[in-house]
Amino acid sequence: MSTQESVSPRIVVGVDGSPSSEAALRWALSQAELAGSVVDAVIAWQYPVSYGWPVMVTEADLAGWAGKTLSESIARVLDPDGSVDVRRLVLSGDASQVLLDTARGAQLLVVGNRGHGGFTQALLGSVSQHCVHHAECPVVIVRDAQPAS
């Protein structure tokens, strides 16, 4: 058996704690159960970028906060009796690029239609739009069932 055959097929899902990302995680788990795939649940973090005055981030544990957000989202969505293997990935970098890099070789990339960005009325957020245009695998965009407030 080759190395490629021994690796379980993967579904990568972006999670940022938003309702649409949790809907995407729920959809990815359901699809993974049908396809016999593992789910790579990914959250990306990065230090804030500022122009002009430097931003001092000295005591912030951004990776820890991101990991906590990811764990809480998975706990809200994951069926404890389910059979899907979920791998938690907390990665540093731009969310779009982190998702694209992680999704290389995956069956699917699943994202919510929009996260916590500033344009809450937009039908498609910048990360999901970037992923649709640049992913090397099929992309599924999942909308939250609740309308934006």
Image (cartoon, rainbow, N blue to C red):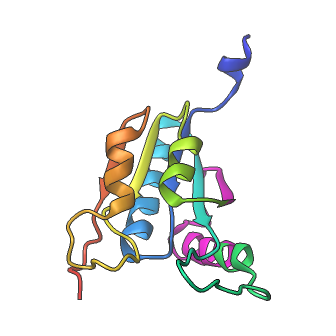
Q: Residue at x 52, y 59 (%)?
A: 95
Residue 5 located within the stretch drawn in magenta? no
Quadrant showing the C terminus = bottom left
Residue range (magenta): 67-91
Q: Residue at x 74, y 86 (%)?
A: 60
Q: Name the one closer to the observer, 146 or 32.
A: 146
x and y, in percent, of residue 46 in the image = 62, 68
Could one spot residue 24 in this view of the protein?
yes
Q: Residue at x 72, y 85 (%)?
A: 57
Question: Left or right: where does residue 59 sit relative to residue 11?
Answer: right
Question: Left or right: where does residue 87 sit relative to residue 113?
Answer: right
Number of marks: 0
Spot the residue most to the top.
1
Question: Left or right: where does residue 148 sit relative to residue 33?
Answer: left
Q: Name the one closer to the observer, 54 or 33.
A: 54
Quadrant showing the N terminus = top right
x and y, in percent, of residue 47 in the image = 64, 73
x and y, in percent, of residue 12 in the image = 52, 47
Picture layout, residue 89 above or below residue 32: below
